[in-house]
Image: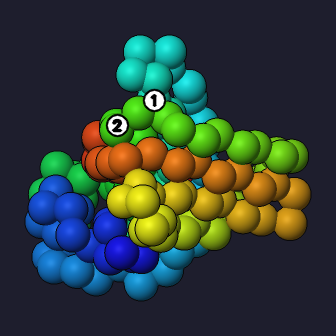
Amino acid sequence: MSWIDFLNADRGLAEVFGGPLLRSPAIVLHELTLHRDGPRARLRFDLVEFPVDPPAKWAAASCNTVQVTVEAAGGLDVLEVSGFTMSGEVVAGLGDLADGRRELTLLSTDMRARIVSRHFRVATISAHRQE
């Protein structure tokens, strides 16, 4: 399953976008958080795409950016991070490993990250106004 397929398969995002409309693997990473409970990792990021017909609440608040939190919820088997990007612009990838686990990668010119877990899930979906 690819990163795009993973996001498009989420019911909450499908409702926001009116179907599987996400096409770009690019995201703007705000935060990578580690929790000892689980253990687990959490990524908070903005999508580079915004729905043509956003929810009424988002339209009323003049939101123009979707923010998503994805969690490695099946334990944290591997975590590798090298570098950091101040712009937050990264390309995300998700792949299935032969042993049934999944590998999430984040790549930019300044940063590389790799997270391996048995399960990833979309934890939150929100919107905000990006100036």
Front one among 17 and 104: 104
Q: Is residue 70 in view?
A: no
Q: Is residue 59 left or right of residue 56?
A: right
Q: Residue at x 54, y 69 (%)?
A: 93
Quarter of the image with the C terminus is bottom right
Q: Residue tagged by mark 1? A: 40
Type of the residue with mark 2? Ala
The colour scheme used here is rainbow
Q: Residue tagged by mark 2? A: 73
Q: Which of marks 1 and 2 is nearer the N terminus?
A: 1
In which quarter of the view is residue 110 placed? bottom right
Type of the residue with mark 1? Arg
Residue projecting furthest to the top: 37
**Above or below, 111 relative to 93:** above
Where is residue 127? Give x, y as percent. Answer: 34, 49
Q: Residue 20 carries which label?
A: none
**Alpha-carbon span between mark 1 and mark 2:** 6 Å
Q: Which residue is drawn at 21% across and 69% down?
A: 9
Where is residue 82? Give x, y as percent. Answer: 83, 46
Where is residue 107? Give x, y as percent. Answer: 72, 64
**Above or below, 35 relative to 18:** above
Q: Residue at x 53, y 58 (%)?
A: 104
Q: How crowded is mark 2: few (under 14 residues within 10 Å), some or many (20 or more)?
A: some
Front one among 67 and 59: 67
Q: Is mark 2 on a helix, strand or loop?
A: loop
Report the number of discs: 2
Front one among 90 and 128: 90
